[in-house]
Amino acid sequence: MTDRQRLHATFMELCSIDSEPKNERPMADRLTGILRGLGFSVTEDDTGRKIGGNAGNLIARLDGTRPGASLLFSCHMDRVAPGVGVKPRIEGDYIISDGTTVLGADDAAGLAAIIEGLTVIREQNILHPPLEIVFTVAEELALTGSAHLDSSLITSRCGFVLDAGGPVGEIVVQAPEQAKINAVFVGRSAHAGFAPEEGISAIQMAALAITRMKLLRIDPETTANIGSIQAMGPTNIVCDRCSLQAEARSLDPQKLQAQVEGMVQTMKSVAAEMGGTVEVEIQRCYPSYQLDGDAEPVRRSAEAAARIGVPVRFKPTGGGSDANHYNNRGIPAVVLSCGYEKVHTTGERIALEQLDLLARWVVEIITG
Ligand SMILES: [Zn+2]
């Protein structure tokens, strides 16, 4: 039903378009052209201007050829660095990059599968309900693009976000909430040789606080991590400023709250103990969600997966996606596994067979 050659060509073309976060312009232009060619009306919001990028989220709409509730399909247009100058090629059963960049299958596999699915629907005159497509920017920057999306523009109440690793057929029904912590320890500078007792080392404060924190795997639902610490100074001065960036995630909002409070409390008590201070800023990145088996996108994607003959598996994820924002705004949405592997590395790859299955999954979800 789907055209494998065409799908592979679309995928490789999209991978070769430069599209790092906030530089999605060429990708947005290409996708707008493709969607208009398929009969969609396409608008672009002003998220690019708001976040300092050169493109906004694309929102596309196509009337149904049969009655039915509108369906939303969504992917992100950006990819992580190094994602410029990607040279995709087929090697054996896989599509890979040349090893100097990521492949960009995350999320070009989703983009290409949606385009192929829509192309099949249009050229074969297959009856379909109204369709909405959202292609977001800056997903890789903590879901910034979808955070700025005006969800009142979306009428669908059943969404499919093509944006997860794992074999086609796996459906993400649960995702964590994430918070980021930015902290700056402030101590007191002093000559490190003549009068170190007059100084308070911000580096020591940060180090002590980190060693006292509970980090990494907290429980089956909760994680926490220090991403970076920065302090810079000559060795002959007691360093008086040290900043630290951390995150915590949990499927359970209360556990997340407890973990974040624990980390912040530890920083404050260490600062007080050592005679310094700490300024802390907490940023809630995105909310968690959990869908049950009766939810329309869960049921619909599972039935469609069964029809293309792949095993169906419901799973939680430890990461966020645009689906966090959709669900939080009253648009139930699952994340579909796209079959790509080793994402966010230069070894990223996707099996041709998985890409083919993904496009067929899209068609089956639409026609189901
Ligand atoms: Zn992704």
Image: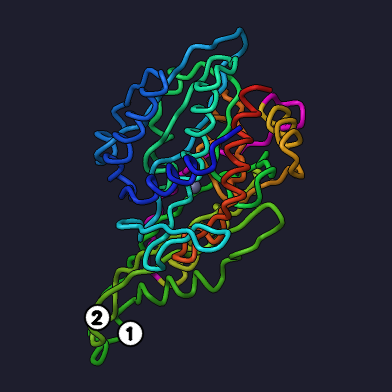
Looking at the picture, tell me which residue is in the foreground, 311 or 150. 311
- CB of mark 2 within 8 Å of CB of mark 1? yes
Question: Which quarter of the image is occupied by the N terminus?
Answer: top right
Residue 109 in the image, given as x and y percentages of width and height: 50, 45
**Which of pointers 2 and 1 lies earlier in the amino acid sequence?**
2
Q: Is residue 277 left or right of residue 309?
A: left
CB of mark 1 near ligand 1 (< 8 Å): no
Residue 49 in the image, given as x and y percentages of width and height: 24, 34
Q: Residue furthest bottom?
A: 193
- Residue topped by disc 2: 190
Q: Residue at x 46, y 16 (%)?
A: 62
The crowd level at tag 1 (other Cα within 10 Å; few <14, some 14-19, many 20+) is few
Q: Quadrant of residue 244?
A: bottom left
Q: Is residue 266 left or right of residue 188?
A: right
Over which residues does the magenta segment extend?
A: 275-296
- Residue topped by disc 1: 197
Q: Residue at x 42, y 49 (%)?
A: 12
* Residue type highlighted by circle 2: Ala
* Residue type highlighted by circle 1: Glu
Distance between the alpha carbons at the discs numbered 2 and 1: 8 Å
Q: Is residue 48 left or right of residue 80?
A: left
Q: Residue at x 23, y 87 (%)?
A: 236
Q: How is the image coloured?
A: rainbow
Q: Nearer the viewer's eye, disc 2 or disc 1? A: 2
In the figure, 234 relative to 104: above or below? below
Q: Is residue 97 left or right of residue 67?
A: left
